[in-house]
Amino acid sequence: MKVLLTRTNLDSKHLAKKLNDFGVTSVISPVIKIVSIPVEVPNKSDFQSIIITSKNTLETVKKLYFSQKVPIFCVGDITAQLFENSGFSNVKSASGTSEDLLELFVKSCNPEKGPVLYLAGQDTHGAIERDLKQYGFIIEKKIAYRAEAVSRLTQDAEQALRSGEITGIFIFSPRSAIILNELISTFKLHKAIKKTTAFCLSDAVAKEASATAWSNILISERPTQESILELLRKNLKSL
């Protein structure tokens, strides 16, 4: 069985190793590339903590020279592990969704202890920012990166799709699904996709992916890598 991975190269390589344990071969073809945006935070000592919703902010935090003891709150375990591996000693993971992160943060922090720095991507929706303000927190949001669409899938990916080698495609964000739809249309890959299953990280991802006709669309129970791998494991025999 061969699948197509559409995350960034680093993420896809990590996932490919996990998939190999299932006997699944991966073709990596990111549909987005991450571009860092310079961030200035002159008042670093004012912030009681930092909220992180993507590991793409790691280099930004390191360049800002925050204390390695600063409390950092992450959505997922992989992001938290990366920050810990970089020397940050006060990292907490919600191990799940943005809703889980909100619950963890509210239980752990007090609005009276100062403002909160929220590092996010350019296309990040403001749910966490809005919800925390309702709890009385002062949030300063900084855009640390943007995700740009690639102009084309890799040659290996296109060839594998056209030859019918690809059984499934892993899609991890609504934006990735939208870009993938555009690439499928532009390069006339509809026939190949009709024989392929979309493995989607969430309902929001599946909603965007559904604009293309797939053999099947499967949705992860939780928006985590572990959950989407479990989704594959449960469906291996039927693919």
Image: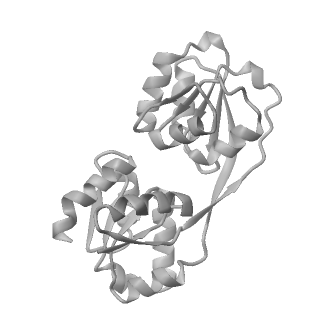
The colour scheme used to paint the residues is one colour
Counting the numbered discs, the total is 0
User: Residue at the spot x=64%, y=43% of the render?
Assistant: 58
* Left or right, 222 with reference to 49: left
Confirm whether residue 76 shows in the render: no
User: Residue at the spot x=27%, y=53% of the render?
Assistant: 230
User: Residue at the spot x=77%, y=42% of the render?
Assistant: 39
- Residue placed farthest to the left in the image? 237
Given residues 185 and 73, the one toward you in this image is 73
Given residues 83 and 122, the one toward you in this image is 83
Residue 34, image quadrant: bottom right
- Residue placed farthest to the top in the image? 112
Confirm whether residue 134 shows in the render: yes
Residue 85: give x, y in percent of width and height.
Answer: 58, 39
* Left or right, 164 with reference to 157: left
User: Residue at the spot x=54%, y=68% of the render?
Assistant: 31
103 up-or-down from 98: above or below: above
Residue 223: give x, y in percent of width and height.
Answer: 38, 47
Residue 201: give x, y in percent of width and height.
Answer: 37, 54
Q: Quadrant of the C terminus?
A: bottom left
Residue 187: give x, y in percent of width and height.
Answer: 50, 85
- Residue placed farthest to the right in the image? 42
